[in-house]
Amino acid sequence: MNVRSTCLLAVLFLVAAVARAEEKPADVKLEPLFNGKDLSGFKVPAPNVWWKVVDRVLVGESDGVSADQKKGNVMYTEKSYTDFALESDVRFADGIDSGFIYGGKPELQVQIGVSRSLKVDMTGSIYYKGKYPPEARAKGVDKLLKLNEWNTIRMEVKGKTTKVWLNGQHVLTFDCPEATTGGPVGLQIHPGVKMKVEFRNLKIAELK
């Protein structure tokens, strides 16, 4: 490869990186997924020892050890989605393990908090088939994430592609190797973890 070709490739990679960094969310009207009053629209577990509404905030909490809580829970929406945009303010402390679960088959997850396997915060990254593939790991989150404060997470799923923004900054575009079937969207309480995660302004829109 000559010098001109090498320089051209370097420019193309730089242009692609800048384009990804400046990527904007889709211009769609998001509708409330959580009404701020109760758990309507979700398949609430029975018995429900994890999820409640406090001051218009959806709270998921577990002591991680008692028999009724240590198994954790994923609370799914009643409705299924294939291509969609979802946005929420999320507040959590260090050490929690939660996320938005989606896709049906195969199931994927946009991580919130610390990975149990990697022992590091993977917020904004995608968990896929038991792993966090290198290409599914969010970039620059350490500079954007504010623990114990409200953070805005936005994800957009279109075909095989998932895009993630954290506090207005694009942090990930992941092209899944396979198409998903679509399905409900879930909020996770990880098994065996003492944790509390809060959601507000939880909204969603289908993408055409």
Image (cartoon, helix red, strand yellow):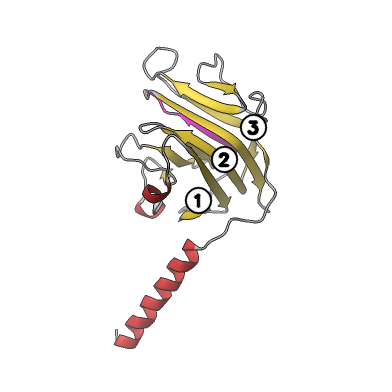
- For marks 1 and 2, the one nearer the N-term is 2
Q: Which residues are magenta?
A: 183-191
**Residue assigned mark 2:** 88
The foreground one among 67 and 18 is 18
Please state which amino acid type lies under the numbered disc 2: Ser
Looking at the picture, how far across and down is residue 177, in whole percent?
A: 45, 54
Please state which amino acid type lies under the numbered disc 3: Phe
Q: Please indicate whether residue 96 sits to the left or right of residue 163 in the image.
A: left
Q: CA distance from mark 2 to mark 3?
A: 10 Å
**Residue assigned mark 3:** 34
The foreground one among 14 and 182 is 14
Please tell me which residue is depicted at 55% across the width and 33% down the height of the picture: 199
The quadrant of the picture occupied by the C terminus is bottom right
Q: Please indicate whether residue 171 sits to the left or right of residue 34 in the image.
A: left
- For marks 2 and 3, the one nearer the N-term is 3
Taking 207 as reference, is 3 above or below it?
below
**Residue assigned mark 1:** 164
Looking at the picture, how far across and down is residue 97, in whole percent?
A: 40, 32
Q: Of helix, strand and loop, which one carries label 3?
A: loop
Of badges 1 and 2, nearer the viewer stands 2
Taking 62 as reference, is 161 above or below it?
below
Taking 64 as reference, is 170 above or below it?
below
The foreground one among 68 and 15 is 15
Q: Is residue 137 in view? A: no
